[in-house]
Image (spheres, coloured by chain):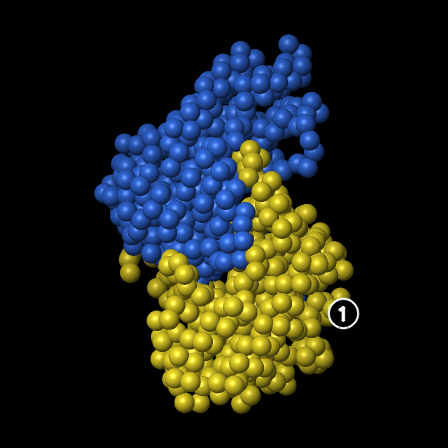
Chain colours: A blue, B yellow
Amino acid sequence: MSQYWSKLVHSLTPYVPGEQPKINNLIKLNTNENPYGPSPKVIAALQKEAADSLRLYPDPNSDGLKQAIAEYHGLNANQVFVGNGSDEVLAHVFNALLKHDKPILFPDVTYSFYPVYCGLYEIEFETVPLNDAFEIKVEDYFKANGGIIFPNPNAPTGRLLALPEIERLLKNNTESVVVIDEAYVDFGGESAVALVNRYPQLLVTHTLSKARSLAGLRVGYAVGHPDLIDALHRVKDSFNSYPLDRFAQAGAIAAMQDKSYFEEMRQRVIETREKLVNDLESLDFEVLPSGANFIFARHPQYDAEALAASLRDQKVIIRHFKKPSRIAQFLRITIGTDEECQALVKALKNTLKI
Amino acid sequence: MSQYWSKLVHSLTPYVPGEQPKINNLIKLNTNENPYGPSPKVIAALQKEAADSLRLYPDPNSDGLKQAIAEYHGLNANQVFVGNGSDEVLAHVFNALLKHDKPILFPDVTYSFYPVYCGLYEIEFETVPLNDAFEIKVEDYFKANGGIIFPNPNAPTGRLLALPEIERLLKNNTESVVVIDEAYVDFGGESAVALVNRYPQLLVTHTLSKARSLAGLRVGYAVGHPDLIDALHRVKDSFNSYPLDRFAQAGAIAAMQDKSYFEEMRQRVIETREKLVNDLESLDFEVLPSGANFIFARHPQYDAEALAASLRDQKVIIRHFKKPSRIAQFLRITIGTDEECQALVKALKNTLKI
């Protein structure tokens, strides 16, 4: 606290990301990173950037990257916005497109950065409860609002909403922007990008941190109608002209272009997930159906916080959300390699004394 | 324009950075980049980051980099904030420390991003005229305000304010934050970092884009009292947890640690600047005294815009600020290599028919 702080600073409750421990030999299944590294073509592109040309500014508009993303999705470059991770993209989305007179809507159980953005930009929000199966029911959003946002698959539940349901929401919500945050869609969901040419109120956000194994590079993007993209550019160019450095642009272009590596890696994660779900169910865990590179599970007899602590003692870290809520007994477990997931199961058996 | 835009978006006038042309063989003296590449130690550190570890998030707090910056300046790590270029650092500074009931103060001729930030965060400002020699007179700032910010050396004039004058300002302005933007200080100025332990209202910002030749990597920082730094972290952690990717953190640490390369490169730029000033004065240019890696000059007989256009025809690009103002007849010229500056002088002689 200080007299020099703006009024806003006093009111903020910052987001707390999952732990990035500085200890070696941990099995790290807590922040939804990909267990496999990026494509060799990405590594080669990045190596080239470690050069004298770093003395020069990067392209402030990331035109090459926007073009690569547009080509991947069959869109035009003026339908693409890029940022320093999808968190930065989302920050600009809240400021540029979700700040109106009416409260915005998002699920009661969802990405916990959304209320933080609302605090930063002084946006009112209402949370809409998931149903008892932790599903989003789109009809619950058919009411006056300043905007709607949710991840699909949702985080941290992993539950998917089918594309026809998203289209039904769009048909019933034409007066405000609908943001579908597809950070995890490549692990089993059907992307709403297919709808952007038909619904000018739809914005879809993606990240290269998950399915493209580039959490360390910080690249995310949004696609939608050029008018929505234009709003994001206006805010971005009032904040920071050059948010993507030369490595981020070059690496992301190579990642968007290497489709076969991307397909192989996401299939591998999906296969490991299915095996892990079976293993956990055989230990009596209830596991929500997941379309993501993580699962959300609870054990009917064991306390989630105690389980997480016991796993940590065995050098396996997963994520437990400590806030009292109806997800307090759930654990969110990132899909690692087959070996990592087996080590997790072994540690769980040890704890559960099976 | 769109019904989906927030009210703010309609009111913004985004910043327009200097051109980053996609043409080869230009002599590019328009965006104050360093003509020399980064240290070989930086390149080596960056090459190591092109690896499988990119699948993992970077350290959200950039602790290693904060430590390296603290050591460089003889401060503690809790006096350091880092961001995605000093533009992002400044954006958070405006929001966290310069938004109060009274208008903030900055020079009438200065970095043109400042009024853009004020637009983004709806901060009132008053500009304070430079004197006829384009100098900042600190007594002009001795009045009620919500904060004070200026670059030292100032941009685009290049004029330096001596450290005792900054201290006189701090003694007379204790109720609001004073931000000294030292993007260019390493080319001849005396840093106000020496004062941060004595003045809790002082924040000093730096960039690695200029003297450390890393415009392509996007790293900037602020140093000041831990309370000011804390405010910046609160805003940053409400905006984007991971603004510095793995390359930015590793490259910046290596750059802060290689002091001898840094000393050599900044001396080289200073020497070329002195030669270029002499050459331009011999062509009858009036050149403002510069403490930066650029100079600000006008010719008594030739129109600045026409001169810039003629240079461009000869493949030399410099920056002319087109807005009608008392700097309309000035050209801002980045210090290149000796060869580039000679080519500029040759092109000017050609235009001036000397």
Which residue is at a point 51% across and 79% down the rendered structure image?
Answer: B296
Give B209 or A325, whichever is nearer the viewer: B209
Quadrant of image for the C terminus of chain A: top right
The residue type indicated by label 1 comes to: Arg
Residue B104: image location, x then y, percent: 55, 74
**Residue highlighted by disc 1:** B198
Chain of the residue on which disc 1 is drawn: B
Q: Residues within 10 Å of mark 1 (few under 14, many from 20)?
A: few
Q: Is residue B345 visible?
A: yes
Residue B175: image location, x then y, percent: 66, 74
Give A73 or A316, whichever is nearer the viewer: A73
Q: Is residue B155 left or right of residue B68?
A: left
Figure check: A97 above or below B179: above
Which residue is at a point 52% across and 86% down the rendered structure image?
Answer: B282
Query: Which of the 4 image quarters holds residue B46?
Result: top right
Query: Which of the 4 image quarters holds residue B57?
Result: top right
Residue A134: image location, x then y, percent: 44, 29
Residue B243: image location, x then y, percent: 54, 49
Point out the residue furthest to the top here: A354
Which residue is at a point 32% across and 52% down the rendered structure image?
Answer: A228
Figure check: B260 above or below A125: below
Figure check: A222 above or below A189: below
Which residue is at a point 55% across and 63% down the rendered structure image?
Answer: B34
Q: Is residue B131 visible?
A: no
Give B292 or A70, whichever is nearer the viewer: B292
